[in-house]
Image (tube, coloured by chain):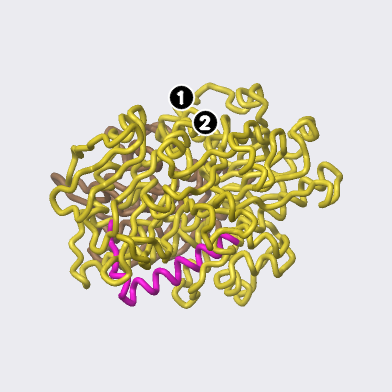
């Protein structure tokens, strides 16, 4: 095991991990001096170096400024592999497959809803199942419907009347990952998922009502229909138990596969299989199912959020005007085409706690955002702010079109609880104008703002390094947590 | 460390929790593999809810197979989480009926979650293989497990 990883400063925002030992390529970490000191405290740099040892890696093994330790691959890690001699690894995607964020904007101004926030948050808390074991009684899926969820993703949700057809245009991959095959999803995964569609889950997942506090780029913000003072909603959740089970099932399979294909692993958690193997195709087909489940999940929750706001504020859909700005994934392995050494090449890009950030003119982003680039949504902690960015050409050239995904934890859950002990967290946040409700008793203490890095330092690194461009900052008014 | 359960008064604890930035870990102990696996299961459910609030009313038989004690530990704990996720079963009593290096059969007992009586502390996504070990030192069995929250 490597313990002390040497890093070489390239510029104020880029640190190189030189190629040593069994590394096939260099590591590259996007960060700044201050955050690097924190990053060095856990084994995540070693993980970046370990990923660089995997067969068929193309370009560098990369990490975003919100990097921290994860299973096998670091969270905040980005790595691309050649389709012919590269690999796919469930640890490069994570347990919460297609955990992601969606942003909705409205016709309302912050002033219009300020007095309604407690009522609104309480109603959201009632209507959106959050926390362990809760679910909507009015949503029960037959085996056939579950199959549709896994194959069609958000398109299925829309076809059932939850949201409009336009929504899918504003979801990464149109809300449906192709190649999903439920035959490769275990009975156990299906059982865990069947009562969890349309549920937020626990931990760091949330629904947040807020407003646009600051605009950094008027033109881009305009193209994304965002303006200062406007009320917004963020939904952060993923594929729930179904995705966790798919990950668990395939880690088991890949542990065997790594031996079968004689892949030399610096760490067992990097277990993987050649992209050309049967095991890989099965994993990618199951992963796509979990990803589609997550798209459905966010689509359903967003629909209930809209219903709830309309109900509480006694207004129709036109007056509220809630519309989908964008929905991004941040735990995925995707087959994409990128330019490598002047040639177009098909790659399997792993983004684990990293967001796709495609530039203007990319054929893979919505037509109406073509001039400005793909929206990237970076949630912060519940007491501070979140950011909207857009993808850039630099990201496309340097990071296979990827950027950061969030603030990243600073304190362990236990440390956070210690810090929060004896404090009235709900009151503290209310004093800051943020009304919070949470299902889990310990969640609020674990999720206190101090438990996270200041997301602005993370966002400033990617902005200054050019792998994302700041557009707007959003401030929370009301939050429900799992 | 005492989080998340109550204080452990025994000289040698059944289990103790360890720090991990994004997730949570524990070490469990036992004088036999049977006790080790039972204590690890207690540690897992104590992360979810206070064991004291669980009444032993529903019984299940659990059987798992895995290649070796390490993998068996993960499979066992994930099987228990599966019972919670799919049936809402909170478990507190774990009797290991038979254990070999690649096989475990147990009777587990608990009750269905009742939001009125059970205050859930946090959800658990999965039990992971990270920093996992099951080993025997001087006649004492020990395991380390990290869970993804």
Position of residue A79 measured from the top left corner of the image (x, y, whole percent): 34, 55
Residue A215 included in the magenta stretch of the image: no
Position of residue A254 measured from the top left corner of the image (x, y, whole percent): 30, 66
Q: Provide the letter of the chain coloured brown.
A: B
Q: Secondary structure at mark 1?
A: helix
In the picture provided, is A261 more to the left or to the right than A176?
A: left
Residues packed near mark 2 inside 10 Å, few (<14), some (14 to 19) or many (20 plus): many
In the picture provided, is A238 more to the left or to the right than A287?
A: right
The dominant secondary structure in magenta is helix
x 27%, y 42%: residue: A45
x 35%, y 35%: residue: A13
Task: State yes or no: discs 2 and 1 in contact (Cβ < 8 Å).
Answer: yes
Q: Pick the residue in front: A89 or A480.
A: A89
Q: Quadrant of the N terminus of chain B?
A: top left
- The disc placed on residue B127 is none
Image colour for chain A is yellow
Residue A292 included in the magenta stretch of the image: yes
Of tags 2 and 1, the one toward the viewer is 2
According to the image, label 2 marks what residue? A448
- The disc placed on residue A419 is 1
Magenta span covers which residues? A270-295
């Amino acid at each position: 095991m490597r313990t002390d990883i040497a890093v070489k400063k390239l510029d104020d925002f880029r640190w190189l991990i030189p190629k040593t030992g069994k590394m096939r390529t260099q590591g590259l970490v996007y960060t700044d001096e201050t955050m690097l000191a924190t990053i060095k405290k856990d084994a995540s740099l070693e993980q970046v170096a370990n990923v660089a040892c995997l067969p068929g890696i193309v370009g560098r093994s990369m990490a975003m400024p919100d990097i921290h330790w994860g299973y096998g691959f670091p969270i905040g890690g980005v790595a691309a592999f050649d389709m012919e001699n590269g690999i796919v690894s469930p640890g490069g995607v994570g347990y919460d497959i297609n955990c992601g964020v969606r942003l909705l904007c409205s016709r309302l101004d912050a002033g219009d809803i300020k007095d309604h926030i407690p009522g609104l948050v309480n109603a959201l808390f009632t209507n959106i199942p959050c926390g362990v074991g809760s679910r909507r009684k009015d949503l029960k899926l037959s085996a056939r419907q579950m199959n549709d969820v896994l194959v069609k993703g958000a398109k299925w949700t829309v076809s059932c009347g939850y949201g409009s057809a336009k929504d899918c245009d504003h979801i990464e991959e149109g809300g449906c990952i192709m190649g999903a095959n439920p035959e490769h999803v275990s009975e156990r995964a299906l059982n865990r998922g069947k009562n969890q569609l349309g549920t937020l889950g626990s931990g760091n997942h949330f629904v947040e009502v807020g407003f646009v506090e600051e605009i950094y780029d008027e033109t881009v913000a305009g193209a994304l229909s965002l303006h200062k003072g406007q009320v917004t909603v963020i939904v952060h959740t993923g594929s729930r138990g179904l995705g966790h089970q798919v990950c668990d099932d395939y880690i088991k399979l890949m542990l065997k596969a790594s031996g079968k294909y004689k892949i030399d692993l610096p760490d067992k958690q990097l277990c993987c299989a050649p992209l050309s193997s049967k095991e890989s195709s099965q994993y990618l087909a199951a992963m796509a199912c979990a990803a589609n489940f997550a798209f459905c999940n966010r689509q359903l929750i967003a629909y209930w959020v809209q219903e709830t706001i309309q109900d509480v504020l006694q207004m129709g859909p036109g007056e509220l005007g809630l519309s989908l700005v964008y929905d991004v994934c941040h735990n995925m392995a995707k087959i994409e085409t990128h330019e490598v050494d002047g040639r177009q090449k098909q790659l399997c890009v792993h983004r684990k706690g990293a967001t796709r950030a495609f530039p203007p003119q990319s054929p893979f982003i919505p037509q109406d955002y073509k001039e400005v680039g793909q929206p990237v949504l970076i949630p912060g902690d519940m007491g501070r702010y979140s950011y909207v960015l857009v993808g850039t050409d630099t990201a496309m050239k340097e990071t296979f079109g990827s950027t950061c995904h969030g603030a990243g934890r600073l304190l362990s859950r236990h440390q956070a609880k210690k810090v929060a002990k004896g404090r009235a967290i709900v009151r503290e946040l209310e004093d800051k104008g943020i009304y919070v409700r949470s299902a889990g008793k310990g969640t609020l203490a674990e999720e206190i703002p101090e438990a996270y890095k200041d997301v602005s330092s993370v966002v400033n690194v990617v902005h200054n390094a050019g792998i994302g461009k700041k557009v707007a900052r959003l401030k929370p008014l009301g939050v429900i947590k799992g | 460390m005492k989080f998340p359960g109550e204080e452990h008064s025994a000289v040698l604890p059944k289990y103790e929790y360890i720090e991990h930035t994004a997730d949570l870990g524990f070490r469990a102990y036992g004088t036999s593999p049977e006790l080790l696996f039972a204590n690890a299961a207690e540690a897992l459910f104590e992360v979810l809810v206070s064991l004291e609030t669980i009444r032993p009313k529903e019984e299940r038989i659990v059987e798992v197979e895995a290649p070796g004690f390490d993998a068996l530990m993960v499979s066992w704990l994930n099987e228990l989480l599966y019972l919670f996720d799919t049936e809402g079963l909170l478990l507190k009593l774990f009797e290991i009926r038979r254990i070999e290096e690649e096989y475990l059969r147990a009777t587990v007992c608990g009750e269905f979650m009742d939001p009125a009586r059970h205050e859930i502390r946090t959800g658990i996504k999965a039990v992971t293989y990270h920093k996992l070990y099951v080993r025997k030192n001087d006649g004492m069995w020990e395991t380390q497990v990290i869970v993804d929250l």
